[in-house]
Image: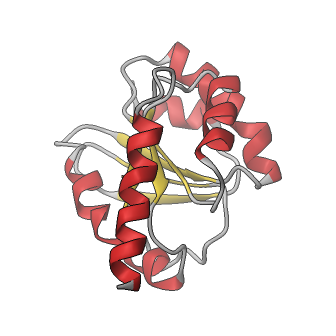
């Protein structure tokens, strides 16, 4: 019963978030990592994990917005990991000019299982970015990103 209620709440949350025209958020569940990686399809991609309550993330997200504007061809996925309201997520994404980006929110517990499944070297800190090159090789970048280096990935 508890699992059913949690699933129902997540469905309702995703529906209410998707109803907002300015920011589309998709739920990211524990077993979605393979689906995220499959989106690369042999092209470079970056997956950025961030949190509304993360101070370095707050400073960095507007820089991501500028990067996305300067590199419209870049395939970047943003995954918000805090247990916060959709309004807080939307507000931060809109301020960062990332409302049109490929945005997800963590729909399951933010736990060690999830971290390990994504990358065994990750211990849950944010911000963190995982990049994939054309051959699918992953690199883990802990802390704020170097946008000059990131732009080389998408050239």
Q: Which x, y percent locates residue 129?
A: 54, 52
Looking at the image, which residue is at 47% across and 18% down?
71
Quarter of the figure with the N terminus: bottom left
The answer to whether residue 48 is seen in the rendering is yes
The answer to whether residue 25 is seen in the rendering is no
Q: Quadrant of residue 93?
A: top right
- Total marks drawn? 0
Q: Quadrant of residue 98?
A: top right
Q: Which x, y percent locates residue 66?
A: 63, 20
Judge left or right: residue 62 versus residue 68: right
Looking at the image, which residue is at 58% across and 59% down?
81
Looking at the image, which residue is at 35% across and 68% down?
7
Name the residue nearer the viewer: 11 or 147: 11
Name the residue nearer the viewer: 53 or 124: 53
Q: Which x, y percent locates residue 39?
A: 23, 44
Q: Which x, y percent locates residue 91?
A: 68, 32
Q: How is the image coloured?
A: secondary structure
Vertical placement of residue 112 versus 51, above or below: below
Vertical placement of residue 54 versus 64, above or below: below
Quarter of the figure with the C terminus: top left
């Amino acid at each position: 019963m508890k699992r059913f209620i949690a699933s129902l709440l997540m469905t309702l949350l995703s529906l209410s978030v998707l109803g907002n025209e300015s920011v589309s958020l998709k739920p990211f569940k524990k077993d979605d990592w393979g689906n995220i990686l499959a989106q690369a399809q042999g092209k470079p991609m970056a997956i950025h994990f961030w949190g509304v309550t993360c101070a370095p993330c707050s400073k960095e997200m507007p820089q991501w917005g500028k990067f996305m504007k300067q590199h419209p061809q870049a395939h970047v996925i943003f995954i918000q990991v805090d247990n916060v309201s959709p309004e807080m997520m939307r507000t931060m994404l809109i301020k960062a000019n990332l409302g049109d980006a490929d945005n997800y929110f963590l729909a399951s517990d933010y736990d060690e299982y999830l971290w390990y499944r994504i990358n065994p070297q990750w211990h849950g800190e944010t911000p963190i970015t995982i990049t994939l090159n054309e051959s699918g090789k992953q690199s883990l970048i802990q802390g704020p990103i170097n946008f000059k280096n990131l732009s080389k990935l998408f050239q």
